Image (cartoon, coloured by chain):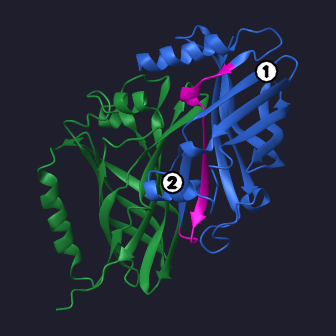
Chain colours: A blue, B green
């Protein structure tokens, strides 16, 4: 656990210095993007992107924010190596041609001082479409290890993968609707 | 709270197989590409950390006509995957999963509740770190289909446990005691022996 904390603290310190820039640093140990899609209408396949980076500007008092998260598409991890390989292939995510996906969220909705949604765009496989991440949970707390405020939560949305040209197996093997599940925590600089 | 080491479990599984043989159930062998246990736990009341075990191994018997079934699953704990290698290694240590001493967790259940022919709930016993506790898994989705002539049944199940019931107290209460389990399973019907 100590190595984790040191790694997270280093990221927090290194990325957060500049004025007018990001004032929170993503904690990579508590920030993950996963997706869920049903398989032949029987069970739900889940996979997670293990590598990501990003920046966060957040002003709770002014009720504004901007978040950018870049996802390393090759880091997809379903627990099934052949499935990961197929997901990376030209059939599905075409990772060799489109190695990253990016979410830019710049419209933060609030209820009181709690974030309820973040709207923006998702760029994947060369196509950009609007996406709104709904907050299932949001909170800020004083982290006793960092001695700093940490804000974060659980967000989700459902996208239609065909909008980004991910058409493999439609509709029998897997439907168009894919649920994205996002865990995020960011450390105040 | 009952404690037992792994030696007792094979006997339990044999007994389970013997008691269900009279029904005429169909047996389904779990498909390793679609059988995983995911866990979720709340971190500092703020965001949900998650991880995955699996593929899980096991056999499910279903007698949908009679509304009965049985399941025995083996879950290797050393393969826990959170996306963070240092976190995975920490989870395997003695005060958490203790994978060296207890390489497998188990779910063994014979109490199946059907709604019509659809499976609704499976009640049984979950064993982690040698500690066995009752656990109910509720079906959020259940379906059977034909895959080139072989019947495949599966679904999504979920349940909750308190990790302290299994002696896992580390970082309580900053990391929550309540752990949500979501289980993906698909099983392929085993063909009867030609004899």
Residue A31 inside the magenta-drawn segment: yes
User: Can the viewer see residue A3?
Assistant: yes
Name the side, left or right, on which B184 lies relative to A56: left
Residue B124 point in image, percent of width and height? 32, 58
Residue B27: quadrant of the picture: bottom left
Q: On residue A58, which mark appears? A: 1
Q: In this picture, is A10 found above or below A164?
A: above
Name the side, left or right, on which B166 lies relative to A123: left
Q: Which residues are magenta?
A: A25-42
Name the side, left or right, on which A54 lies relative to B25: right
Categorize mark 1 by other alpha carbons within 10 Å: few (<14), some (14-19), many (20+).
many
Q: On residue B161, which mark appears? A: none
Which residue is found at the position 64% from the left and 54% from the top? A94
Q: Secondary structure at mark 1?
A: strand
Which residue is found at the position 65% from the left and 44% from the top? A99
Q: Secondary structure at mark 2?
A: helix
Residue A123 point in image, percent of width and height? 77, 45
Label 1 resides on the chain identified as A
Q: Which sits in the foreground, A172 or B172?
A: A172
Residue A160 inside the magenta-drawn segment: no
- Verify CB contact (< 8 Å) between mark 2 and mark 1: no
> Which residue position is annotated with label 2?
A84
């Amino acid at each position: 656990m100590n190595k984790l904390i040191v790694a997270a603290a280093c990221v927090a310190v290194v990325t957060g210095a500049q004025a007018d820039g990001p004032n929170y640093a993503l904690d990579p140990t508590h920030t993950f993007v996963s997706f869920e899609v049903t398989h032949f209408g029987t069970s739900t396949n889940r996979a997670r992107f293990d590598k990501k980076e990003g920046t966060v500007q957040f002003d709770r008092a002014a009720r504004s924010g901007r978040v950018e998260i870049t996802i390393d598409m090759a880091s997809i991890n379903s627990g099934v190596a052949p499935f990961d390989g197929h997901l990376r292939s030209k059939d599905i995510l075409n990772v060799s041609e489109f190695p990253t996906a990016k979410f830019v969220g710049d419209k933060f909705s609030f209820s009181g001082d709690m974030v309820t949604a973040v709207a923006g765009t998702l760029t994947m496989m060369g196509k950009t479409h609007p996406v709104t991440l709904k907050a299932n949970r949001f909170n800020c707390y004083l982290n006793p290890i960092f001695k700093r405020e940490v804000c974060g939560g659980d967000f989700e949305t459902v996208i239609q993968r065909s909008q980004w040209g991910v058409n493999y197996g439609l509709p029998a093997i897997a439907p168009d609707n894919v649920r994205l599940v996002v865990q995020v925590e960011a450390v105040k600089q | 709270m009952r404690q037992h080491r792994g030696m007792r479990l094979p006997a339990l599984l044999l007994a389970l197989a013997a008691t269900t043989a009279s029904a005429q159930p169909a047996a389904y062998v779990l498909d390793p590409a679609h059988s995983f246990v995911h866990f979720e736990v709340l971190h500092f009341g703020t965001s949900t950390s998650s991880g995955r075990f699996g593929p899980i191994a096991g056999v499910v018997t279903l007698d949908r006509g009679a509304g009965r079934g049985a399941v025995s699953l083996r879950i290797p704990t050393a393969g826990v995957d959170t996306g963070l290698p240092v976190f995975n290694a920490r989870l395997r240590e003695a005060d958490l999963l203790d994978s060296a001493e207890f390489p497998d967790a188990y779910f063994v259940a014979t109490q199946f509740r059907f709604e019509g022919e659809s499976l609704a709930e499976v009640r049984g016993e979950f064993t982690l770190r040698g500690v066995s506790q009752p656990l109910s898994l509720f079906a959020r989705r259940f379906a059977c289909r034909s895959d080139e002539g072989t019947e495949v049944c599966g679904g999504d199940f979920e349940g909750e446990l308190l990790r302290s019931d299994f002696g896992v107290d580390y970082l309580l209460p900053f990391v929550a005691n309540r752990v949500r389990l979501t289980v993906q399973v698909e099983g392929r019907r085993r063909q009867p022996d030609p004899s």
